[in-house]
Amino acid sequence: MQLSTKTGGIAGVVLLLAGFLGGFVPQYQRANTQEAEVQRLTAETAKLRAEGRLGQLRDLVSLVYFQASRKNYGLASEQAAALFKLAEELSNGADEGPKPLAKRILQDRDALVGGLAKGDDGVMGLLAPLVEAAHGIKK
């Protein structure tokens, strides 16, 4: 039994289309799966980055507190400058995690800078609530 040229042409097109779809569908599914994985990893990376920045903020608050408690006001001032710089970046950034703490730190900037410059023990009263806020300590 021989196929007519028209039937053979149609059969060829159908086989070509079936072959194309047979290769396209698995690739399309794999691409969608990988796209979802990339989106998940991007979100996780952003979350970890925000947590890392929040950790840096905590560390700097703690260092300023530690140096001030030891009456090393010069070192505390240096650490405070780094703290305020980071807090400024985070309060203007897109990461929502560290924003509230960064804004809280910036509220007391002038008083802290002045107190550290004078070597005033009163800065401990300003630093203690910041450390508590940074570490989630509730009274």
Image (tube, grey):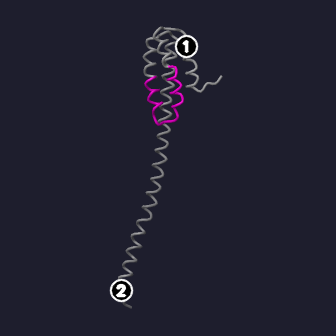
Judged from the image, the secondary structure of the residue bearing numbered disc 2 is helix
Q: How many marks?
A: 2
Residue 96 belongs to magenta span: yes
User: Residue shown at 40%/77% (left/top)?
Assistant: 14
User: Residue shown at 47%/39% (left/top)?
Assistant: 46
Considering the image in quadrants, where does the N terminus appear?
Answer: bottom left
Image quarter for residue 6?
bottom left
- Reading the image, the residue beneath label 1 is 124
Judged from the image, the secondary structure of the residue bearing numbered disc 1 is helix
Q: Where is residue 53 shown, x and y percent of the image?
A: 47, 31
Considering the image in quadrants, where does the C terminus appear?
Answer: top right
Label 2 Cα crowd, 10 Å radius (few <14 / some 14-19 / many 20+):
few
Left or right of 47 on screen, residue 12:
left
The range drawn in magenta is: 84-108
Residue type, mark 2 in image: Lys
Please identify the dominant SS of the magenta region: helix
Circle number at residue 6: 2
